[in-house]
Amino acid sequence: MTDNRFHRLEILFGPEATERLANASVVVFGLGGVGSFAAEALVRSGIGRLTLIDFDKIDITNMNRQLHATSDTIGHAKVQVMAARCRSINPLARIEPIQDFFTSDNSDELLDRGYDYVLDCIDHVTAKLTLIEQCQQKKLPIIASMGAANKIDPSQIHIADLADTHGCRLARIVRRELRKRGIETGIKVVYSTEAFEPLSAGRRETTADKSYQDRRAPLGSSSVIPPLFGLTMAGEVIRAVAKKEK
C-alpha cells in the first residue's frame, strides 16, 4: 500500500522539494511552548532527520501552551515525549532526542552534526546568545525566537532580521549583547511588536538548588502566542529547505 502521509505536501511543493525535505536535517533547541509546536510542524512536513534538544521535564504549569504536556506526561523528559510523538507521526523519520542544556562547553558536540537549519527556541538568554554566535561562526542557518511571553495578539507577530526588530524587550537585549560579540545583522528572528506588561517583581534568577521551574519567576503565557511563534519558525524553515533558501 502506498504511504500517502505527505501527499498533500507534495501537491503544494512538488516532488523535488518534498525529497529535499525528506533529506534535510534540522535541530530544535528548546521544547517549550515555541519549540514543541515547531518540532511537530517540521515532522509533519516531512523533515527526514530531526534532532530535539532540551534538558527539562514536563511540568503541570506547561499545560496551557506546550504540545507534549498532558496529565499522562507530567514528570517525563520533554525530549523523550516529543520524540515518541514525532516517531508516531512519521516512523521513517530519524528522530534523535538529546536531554541536555546547551552551553559553550558542549556547543561543538551538539552543533557539528550536519544540520541544514537550526531553530533557537531557548528562553535562557546566555544560552541563546551562545547558540546564535556559534551558528554564525559555523555558518549554520538559524532562526531564533524572541519574547513570546506576556503577549496575546497574534496579529503583531513578525519575521525580520534581528537588526530590524522593534518593540520586543528580549530582541533589544539580544541585539545589544550580540553587538558586543561583533554580530549586528544576519540573524532571522520571529518576534512580536505587542507591548510587554512587566512583572511587578521583575524577572529573577538565582543559583539556588531548585528545579528549573522554581529558579525563575514565571511570565504569563497564552495558549496561542508561543505555539504561533513555533509554527511561524517551522514555516520559514520548511519554505527555505523546500526552495533551497537560507
Image (tube, helix red, strand yellow):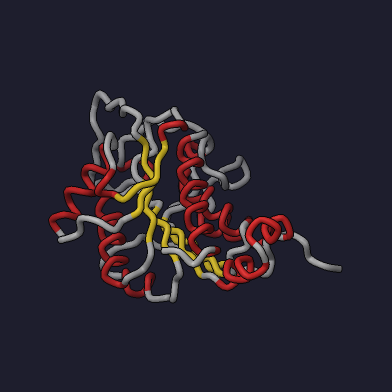
Which residue is at the front of the view, 197 or 188?
188
Residue 16, placed above or below residue 208 = below
Q: Quadrant of the N terminus?
A: bottom right
> Can residue 97 be seen here?
no
Q: Residue at x 21, y 44 (%)?
A: 173
Q: Residue at x 25, y 23 (%)?
A: 200
Q: Residue at x 57, y 52 (%)?
A: 41
Give residue 57's position: percent from left, percent from top: 47, 51
> Can residue 246 be seen here?
yes
* Horizontal relation, residue 170 to residue 225: left or right: left
Q: Residue at x 13, y 56 (%)?
A: 180
* Horizontal relation, residue 162 to residue 48: left or right: left
Give residue 232's position: percent from left, percent from top: 48, 46
Which residue is at the front of the view, 225 or 214?
225
Determine the residue located farthest toward the left in the rendered image. Answer: 180
Q: Quadrant of residue 8?
A: bottom right
Give residue 194's position: percent from left, percent from top: 35, 29
Q: Quadrant of the C terminus?
A: bottom left
Determine the residue located farthest toward the right in the rendered image. Answer: 1
Give residue 128's position: percent from left, percent from top: 30, 54
* Horizontal relation, residue 133 to residue 180: left or right: right
Which residue is at the front of the view, 149 or 195?
195
* Horizontal relation, residue 181 to residue 40: left or right: left
Numbered-mark total: 0
